[in-house]
Amino acid sequence: MKSVVHAACPHDCPDACGVLITVEDGRATRIQGDPKHPVTRGFLCAKVAKYLDRVYSPDRVLYPLRRKEGLGKGGGSRSFADFDQITWDEALDEIAARFRQIAAEFGSEAILPYSYGGTLGLLNSSSMDRRFFHRLGASQLKRNICSAAGECGIESVYGIKLGTEPEQFRHSRLIIAWGANIHGNNVHLWPFIEEARRGGGKLVVIDPYRTRTAKCADWYIPINPGTDVALALGLMHVIINEGLYDREYVAQHTVGFDQLRDRVHEYPPELVARWTGVSAQDIIRLAHEYATQRPAAIRVNYGVQRSENGGSAVRAICMLPCITGSWKELGGGLQLSTSGAFALEREALKRTDLMHKALGRPARSVNMVELGKALATLSDPPIKALFVYGSNPAAVAPNHNLVTEELCREDLFTVVHEQFLTDTTDYADIVLPATTFFEHKDLQTAYGHYYLQLSNQAIAPLGEARSNAEMFRALAQRMRFEDDCFQESLDEMMDAALESDHPFLEGITRERLQREDFVRMNVNGNNGSKLFLPFANGSFKTPSGKAELYSDTLAAQGLDPVARFVPPTESRNANQNGRRKYPLELLARKADNFLNSTFCNMAAVRPIENVDLGLLELHPQDAQTRSIADGQSVRVRNDRGTIYLKACITDAVQPGVAAARLDWAKLSDQRVNINVLTSERLTDMGESATFYSVLVEVEAAHEHRGTSGNPRPAIDRRSGNA
Ligand SMILES: Nc1nc2c(c(=O)[nH]1)N[C@H]1C(S)=C(S)[C@@H](COP(=O)(O)OP(=O)(O)OC[C@H]3O[C@@H](n4cnc5c(=O)[nH]c(N)nc54)[C@H](O)[C@@H]3O)O[C@H]1N2
Ligand SMILES: Nc1nc2c(c(=O)[nH]1)N[C@H]1C(S)=C(S)[C@@H](COP(=O)(O)OP(=O)(O)OC[C@H]3O[C@@H](n4cnc5c(=O)[nH]c(N)nc54)[C@H](O)[C@@H]3O)O[C@H]1N2
Ligand code: SF4
Ligand SMILES: [Mo]
């Protein structure tokens, strides 16, 4: 029996691809892109094209596991031999008993859920799990590790996360990829950019790292990390001074233009050049091109907001199309995220009210960015249990050394629901087997286009794997939570999510999704047009109903009501004259062929990325002053940690900037990854993570051997230096 099932890729990626899975006699035999999907149009990225290897990997966790008795935590990289297989009944009983005991002794807030982007399927990322922890009265998790700063930034100007749809980039004459690695992280936008270029359009890339996208650009502008606020204000300085702005649009649809004009006065190109490293001529030229080569669209991505001033950066960039009136034009505007269009009834899934049932008040919130600090310092109550699902904090959380030190606490009961034995399962007491998207049903939104999809279950769960929703349903039952919501089927939850009065959801039902596989959100309104220009006629969702170039809301929060460049604490601009202990700015970047830490362990995927793994990319000038040769083992360090990498001398980075990639810690002999160097410091807006505001020093490893005080040996055997 052969069938083809429509699904949707649930990984944390703006593209949310339509997928077709061929199933023969119950086994998936092929994965391909759904050619009917209007945005993702039948192709998949390299990593998901190899997904059969992931689903059927011999390394899949397929049964509940308990760490073997006598094995302490932190004992090294755990394999299946370190665990005993147990039954689901045993696992659920043990978790329920420990949770009850911890709640009785310390209060239920001593239990902390930890989840993020393993799956963005709505039902498996934010329904039964939330109900369970709300009903339990567990601490709440602030899921701020990725995009919260940028979300605050865009919402402070537009009031909603809407933007130019990918299909319209084909009409652009000028496209600016601003902190957006389109080739790596948003590859389905690329064909539309190519189409625009065939029509004479031009691509400009603003990024401190010469990405694959930058290499393909018509104009690559390297910028110093964390200085985008200054660049955006400098561009507006030129545009406003030279009268290149759209007076009518500004008058009708914005507030605070006078205050903005006063502010940009302080950002002349010569001064901005000093901070950003972009020459005054280039700033002026870019301002002219952006204001006059129309339509011009900006694809800004979350890269710019992983800096200490990331909220302000996104805020200032979001002002640009409001000044030029670019929102009026097909192929104009800006895209950061389209997620504001998916106006689903999320609260019906999450049931926050259950928290009041448990505690009579909202539970305390713990910021996931500060996991290490929370585990180390919270006392009222301390965190005694951690339930990780859809996340790999021992790889992705900043300040890795503190995180793993705390995960070693013997009094911490850690459960991890996973597909593989990751960095985090190394510290687990219990590991539970999780399904892949082939094995469960879900509802899939997107943050890079406007199509909602049904992701059908293609095959039966492998082994005893359970989806997040089914696992938390079973756990709720074990905890004897009798609320009806724990009985709801997936279809009932889907219906509840879709049952909204919001015009964007009008006419969108489960039946229709089942029939059509993907449905465009009703974003165009009733004008019958297929095209969506979100702010052509204003329609901003801010308190004033206009684009807020000056924001009373920010002022009330004690933040700058316009936008101001404050150099990140960890940056060369923060103290230009001082002699620095850590003079290099490090970009602790994502890999083009992994998805954060997902796929790092896939033998089929690793070779595609391999040339770039374990490398510290360094400019020739910085290598020379440190007598570092290409391929040599180097020690990269700051006060938080040390990692040994292999020097790659390259002009992919500018002088003063270094770059390295995120990988699994357990795949390195040092058992650390690049997050040993990143900090838990939070962003200016949104309390988000600052992965790209990091200062380090780099030394040739052989010269410092034995004197580092670091217990871990230099391990780079490839270079022969260690
Ligand atoms: N292949 C692949 N795809 C992914 C992911 C992945 O890990 N791999 N991750 C997914 C996730 S979770 C997300 S959030 C999205 C993110 O997608 P992006 O926002 O594109 O993510 P990043 O790679 O963090 O940053 C984009 C670029 O910003 C640059 N950058 C860093 N600092 C600055 C700065 O100060 N200014 C400017 N102008 N640029 C800067 C980086 O060098 C990088 O090339 O991608 C998703 N898609
Ligand atoms: N240095 C550095 N650190 C970073 C970043 C960076 O650019 N540089 N990026 C940051 C960003 S933007 C983000 S979003 C975070 C991402 O942080 P995470 O969301 O933790 O991302 P992943 O590394 O993809 O880990 C997801 C895990 O979920 C598992 N999983 C997948 N599907 C399911 C499922 O259905 N159920 C369960 N239970 N598990 C599942 C996968 O196997 C994987 O191990 O990382 C952040 N960390
Ligand atoms: S990771 Fe992104 S590009 Fe790759 S298949 Fe999934 S949605 Fe598409
Ligand atoms: Mo992310």
Image (cartoon, rainbow, N blue to C red):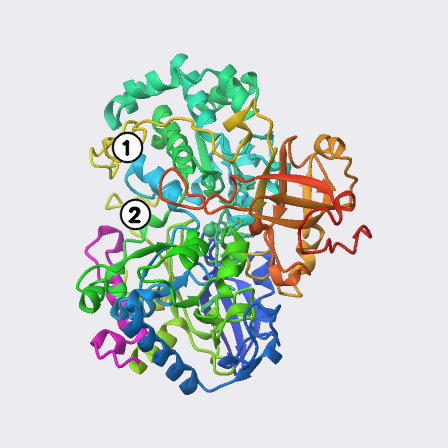
212 to 422, vertically: above or below: above
Q: Which residues are magenta?
A: 479-507
Image location (x, y in percent) of residue 612: 68, 50
Label number found at residue 558: 1
Image location (x, y in percent) of residue 666: 62, 63
Q: Which residue matches tag 2?
A: 523
Q: Which secondary structure, mark 2?
A: loop
Q: Residue at x 20, y 65 (%)?
A: 359
Image location (x, y in percent) of residue 670: 66, 58
Q: Quadrant of residue 356?
A: bottom left
Q: Residues within 10 Å of mark 1 (few under 14, many from 20)?
A: few
Between 25 and 275, which is closer to the camera in this rendering? 275
Q: Is residue 205 left or right of residue 472?
A: right
Image location (x, y in percent) of residue 492: 26, 72
Q: Is residue 417 left or right of residue 529?
A: right
Q: Residue at x 65, y 50 (%)?
A: 643
